[in-house]
Amino acid sequence: MSTHQPPLPQAAPGGSYPGYISPIPVVRTHLGHAIASEWTKIRSVRSTMWTLGVFVLLVVGIGLLAGALVSNSSSSGDLSGASALSLGFFGLLLGSMCIITLGVLTTASEYGTGMIRTTMVACPSRARVLVAKAIVFFSVAFVITLAASAFVAMTQVSMLDGVTRTPTSGEWLKGTVGVSLYIALLGLLSLIIGSVIRHSAGAVTIMIGAVLAPLVIALFMFSSSLEKVRTALFEYSIPNQLSVFYSNSLGDSGPSGWDPLWIILGVTAVAFAGAYALLEKRDV
Amino acid sequence: MIELAGLTKRYGDKTAVDDLTFTVRPGIVTGFLGPNGAGKSTTMRMILGLDHPTAGRVRIDGKRYEQLKDPLTYIGALLDAKAVHGGRSAFNHLLCLAQSNGIPRARVAEVLDTVGLTAVARKKAKGFSLGMGQRLGIAGALLGDPRILMFDEPVNGLDPEGIHWIRTLMKTLAAQGRTVFVSSHLMSEMALTADHLVVIGQGRLLADTSMADFIRTNSRSYVRVRSPQRERLLDVLHGAGITVVETGTGALEAEGGKAEPIGELAAQNGIVLHELSIQQASLEEAFMQLTAESVEYHAHTDSPPVPQAWGTGWDKGA
Ligand SMILES: Nc1ncnc2c1ncn2[C@@H]1O[C@H](COP(=O)(O)OP(=O)(O)OP(=O)(O)O)[C@@H](O)[C@H]1O
Ligand SMILES: [Mg+2]
């Protein structure tokens, strides 16, 4: 391809262009404008209400059900080693599918409808659009997950008072703020995948596959020569990493403590950089 | 003012836009004409920074689109009326656009009123008819009261009243000193609205001319004559130095826009005339002639589709 650039037609003298002057005050747009716009977008569609509604229902419903089952069936002392907080795990694992879906829809649905062109015309800085979407979605996902998981945790702890051990403040922090950050980051990763794949169903499938596949594959690795891979797949699978937030066992291998959070933070950061590079390079 | 210089876009092997250089000036309506697949929408997407040009460049008042700090108050565009999230109401759709450019919230109600959608402002966009969707898209373009407006086939799906409205709107906008750039495949539509014409075919520039010039050079007029004494009439007209073309239907077409000399010649020679009328080749015909070689998707009008024998297409393709 030639790098030759034909000369542009001459600019008007003085560099000023004639024409209509709008009475609307000129505003230098910034990230704040993009965030306000994305907030209007996310709150003005039904899919947000649906995904978040089902999420809260799953987390609270399954959490309370688990609490009730355990408090009725177990005799005092059985579970004294575990804290009641860990019962929140099942609801959150299922509920994460809703957050994944909402994350994907935040970006991919705009490609499905063609709205993305309108968005990018209104805000030509592609980085700003992606960052604004990420901030708005992450905040919404974090706040909702925190509210739901904290409510479930408090209810379960009071239901199982005496049956299980009282959680320490460190466990409280991991079981509420920790898991909420993890779930919100998982959703953010889905948003990024949605921006790369540009197809809602495709991106949701990929993310659900990423959550479930390692665990399922590990289950079918019978051969002893694959023992190491099998353990790694299991330990680093997303469900297992999520469960780390509820356990205080420091296993000899695999992530423990706050490790899962740092892992997903790293993965999300790398994915974000990749998605941004692609967004700049591709046509809208 | 929109300036294109050597603008080129390739998708793989396919050259959608091929070395386009032209300028869209303020104060007039510039029509952007071309048959299906000519590259009009691709050109508009490149102007708006959505598609990266393969070569060449485009400047809006000297700047790249990405350099505009307040794009919507500078340039408003209607690309595809369906480019809205169907689940969002017209009001919220415009509100999120306004917010992204710091445009006062009050403008949303104003433009909804301008396009006549106030009554359905809170209704979901997916329930909108083609024409209502088009009006919502136009509302989005007008939102920032911009100095440059770009419409990709705005009359698509509008009823006659809507078409009349958009025509008047475009002329009013241009009269206020704005740059108005509008695409269409209908020459007749452009003849009524545009002051300047840019015609492309298969991505290449075919014409960049004022509407008046285009009409002057392309609207050939001739006189149609029918007579039972056709041979005698031909002789007489030839004798008088008038160029005549015979048509298949038996009528004669005489060059030049005057009927009087032909009528008088016939009377002097006692020739009976059945028809003597001035005909004007339509602009649509002129446009079709101009783009004839570059039309990509022909319908087969001259021969009815004949079912091909199995396998006849294969030898060529292999
Ligand atoms: N994203 C794309 N990938 C591949 N080819 C494309 C793409 N966009 C457009 N084209 C091709 O480029 C050519 C020009 O398309 P474009 O949509 O710009 O034409 P148009 O003049 O707007 O046509 P119409 O009048 O039908 O709207 C077409 O042949 C089209 O197939
Ligand atoms: Mg088009």
Image (tube, rainbow, N blue to C red):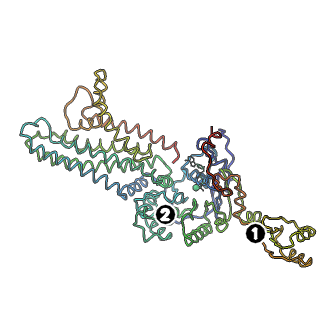
Where is residue A89? Give x, y as percent.
22, 41
Mark in front: 1 vs 2: 1
Above-or-below relation of B234 to A200:
below
Query: Which residue is found at the position 66% from the left and 47% from the top?
Result: B18
> Disc 2 sits on a residue from what chain?
B
> Disc 1 sits on a residue from what chain?
B
Residue A36 as seen in the image, left or right of residue A54: right
Helix, strand or loop status at disc 1: strand
Quadrant hosting residue A258: top left
Where is residue A92? Give x, y as percent.
25, 44
Q: Nearer the viewer, residue A178 or B16?
A: B16
Q: Nearer the viewer, residue A261 or A221?
A: A221
Count neighbours of disc 1 (C-alpha within 10 A) and say few if under 14, some if 14 to 19, many if 20 or more.
few
Q: Nearer the viewer, residue B41 or A145?
A: B41
Query: Which residue is found at the position 33% from the left and 37% from the top?
Result: A264
Above-or-below relation of B22 to A229:
below
* Label annotation for residue B133: 2
Helix, strand or loop status at disc 2: helix
Q: Residue furthest left?
A: A76
Residues at marks 1 and 2, CA–CA distance in whole angstroms: 37 Å
* Label annotation for residue B280: 1
- Identify the amino acid type marked 1: Gln
Residue A245 as seen in the image, left or right of residue B279: left
Query: Which residue is found at the position 70% from the left and 55% from the top?
Result: B292
Q: Residue furthest top?
A: A225
Query: Which residue is found at the position 44% from the left and 68% from the top?
Result: B109
- Identify the amino acid type marked 2: Gly
Residue A185 as seen in the image, left or right of residue B168: left
